[in-house]
Amino acid sequence: NAGVTQTPKFQVLKTGQSMTLQCAQDMNHNSMYWYRQDPGMGLRLIYYSASEGTTDKGEVPNGYNVSRLNKREFSLRLESAAPSQTSVYFCASSAGTANTGELFFGEGSRLTVL
Amino acid sequence: GQSLEQPSEVTAVEGAIVQINCTYQTSGFYGLSWYQQHDGGAPTFLSYNALDGLEETGRFSSFLSRSDSYGYLLLQELQMKDSASYFCAVRDGATGGFKTIFGAGTRLFVKA
């Protein structure tokens, strides 16, 4: 099983450019998440999708949009990239039930905005 | 909103026991998780406590006290490979769907 797959793994953008980070999971999970992690810091929740067809803002949603394309895929879009969005982005998925807290993470996408 | 507090750094020697504490505030608490992350890698799940008490998984144990909004991760027989960052995370269900909010992380240095 591939688990959670993110693309691209590395990206360099100029300020103002747009891009979409793709994420797919093959575990039939209900919930999917996008986090960002800045150097030496914890993971901050950008957006999440508790189930197919729903999306909600997390802690730091400004400057981002998301699409839950289907149960497998959850994409993150930067419409007009800013240097403050330079970060490592992690997609994660979970079964989405009350009795399990396990998130499965992708390998991360390292984004640099110049 | 949610907030979590954990120490920024802990140093211990190989073979020792170390405890990483976490206190949290959230309105829709369902459980407390712990994750390990090595430099350059993705976080990996260690444990989840939904009920009060101690959960043991090999050399790692995790404890939760819901009444005190407090938990800890206990690492025994420390090995050099345990040098990593450790994050506590609350599972919050206040808004109808479950989301997981992470603390800032504790950097563990294991010395020979």
Image: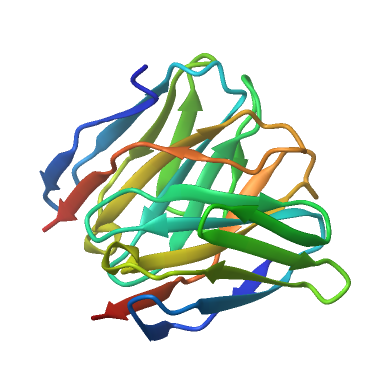
B20 and A52: which is toward the camera: B20
Q: Is residue B1 visible?
A: no
**Residue A103 or B47: which is nearer the viewer?**
B47
Please say if A7 is above or below B94. Answer: above
* Residue A100 appears in the figure: yes
Colouring used for the render = rainbow
- Residue B84, given in percent of the width and then of the height, sits at 33, 66
Tell me where residue A50 sits by quadrant: top right
- Which residue appears at 59% of the width and 47% of the height? A57
Is residue A57 left or right of B96 when viewed as pictured?
A: left
Q: Which image quarter holds the N terminus of chain B?
A: bottom right
Question: Along the horizontal axis of the image, is B9 left or right of A107?
Answer: right
> How many numbered circles are shown?
0
Which residue ends up furthest to the right in the rendered image?
B67
- Please determine whether, in this image, residue A100 is positioned above or below residue B54: above
- Residue at 65% x, 25% y is A51
The quarter of the picture where residue B25 lies is bottom right
Q: Name the residue rendered at 44%, 59% in the picture.
A: A43
How far across and down, in percent of the image, does residue A74 sit?
Answer: 45, 26
Q: What residue is shown at x 57% (from left), y 22% (from top)?
A: A29
Residue B112 location in percent, x, y?
23, 81
Q: Quadrant of residue B60?
A: bottom right
Report x, y in % for residue A107.
29, 40
Residue in the foreground of this view, choosing between B60 and A35:
B60
